[in-house]
Image: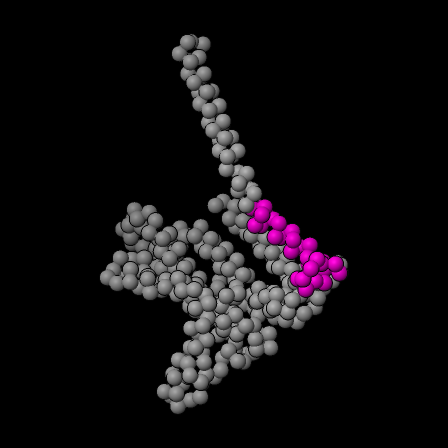
Amino acid sequence: MTAGTYSTGVSTTRRHLGGGSSKLAALILFLPPAMLLFTLFVVLPIGEAAWYSGFNWNGFGRPRNWIGLDNYRFVFDNKAFGTAFRNNLLVIAVSLLVQLPLAMALALILADRFRGAVMLRMVFFLPYILAEIATGLMFSFVYDGDYGLLASVYRLFGAEAPHLLASPQTSFAAILIVIVWKYFGFHMMLYIAALQGLDRNMIEAARIDGASRWQLTRYIVIPSLYPTIRLSIFFSIVGSLQLFDLVMPLTRGGPADSSHTMVSFLYTFGITRMRVGFGSAVGVILFAICVVFAFTYKRWVLRDE
């Protein structure tokens, strides 16, 4: 071994050691505060909710009446919880089958550069910026069968407007319309950002080879968007499971508990009725559903991301 080779090897070893020590120092400096915050605001509340779910407790004083897993049995025996779970599944279905395809279609149109494209993007994205409570209050007026915008439209045609939010058959359908209106703009902007990052040389080459716009979209553009589509589906499903803010100002879960989601069910039956143990059981069930979905989706769908 020559002297030059030896000195090169020593310097390389020192760089590796220096890099390792700097990473270790960064871990020692930044990991404990992050773990502390994660423990305080995630692990402890989850553990506390799981502990409270074993008690028949109203939230005052220390919980003493231990009932084991009875709260979970009460939850699954409650007909309103079954309705809430079904409604969450409906939100997921509408998000995947209506909201995301609509967002994709508009993104494919508005990703091109033409006069007014930026303005149209902003118009479609504005509902997402609007606060959920404000959106709910606004649509509660729109849906009002006596004085709202819907009633005005019906009166133009000499018909009597339905009270959509007051009927168990139509209340949740009205909420689904608001959900699509509010959130499709967020997914549209995700797709537009991904479209603007596509390799233009590949698209131009396909056009030169005679590919039609449909063939470009079907075989080049959409396959290139698969990572963004998978991420969009993840956001959509997790957001659907956590839906709450739009339900409360529109229907508060009524009429006859027909428009509850799992979170609004937790709030109504657990918090407002001072059944903290029961509400904690609902929270643990919802947390378990979200965690199982997140880890499964990450393992089987986002494993290469």
* Count of residue discs: 0
Q: How is the image coloured?
A: one colour
Q: Position of residue 133 (x, y in %)?
A: 46, 67
- 225 left or right, relative to 68: left
Quadrant position of the N terminus in the picture: top left
- 67 left or right, relative to 49: right
Whether residue 83 is visible here, answered yes or no, is yes
Q: Residue furthest front?
A: 61
Identify the residue at horizontal 29%, vertical 62% (top origin): 119
Q: Nearer the viewer, residue 224 or 134?
A: 134
> Image quarter for residue 143?
bottom left
Q: Nearer the viewer, residue 261 or 30?
A: 30
- 153 left or right, relative to 268: left
Q: Position of residue 141 (x, y in %)?
A: 43, 77
Q: Is residue 43 above or below residue 2?
A: below
- 32 left or right, relative to 179: right
Q: Is residue 235 above or below residue 248?
A: above
Identify the residue at horizontal 46%, vertical 27% (top origin): 19
Within the magenta stretch, is there residue 46? Answer: yes
> Image quarter for residue 113?
bottom left
The residues colored magenta run: 38-65
Q: Residue furthest left?
A: 115
> Image quarter for residue 181?
bottom left
Identify the residue at horizontal 59%, vertical 46% (top origin): 39
Identify the residue at horizontal 61%, vertical 52% (top origin): 45
Whether residue 292 is visible here, answered yes or no, is no
Q: Position of residue 148 (x, y in %)?
A: 41, 81
Q: Position of residue 203 (x, y in %)?
A: 31, 50
Within the magenta stretch, is there residue 45? Answer: yes
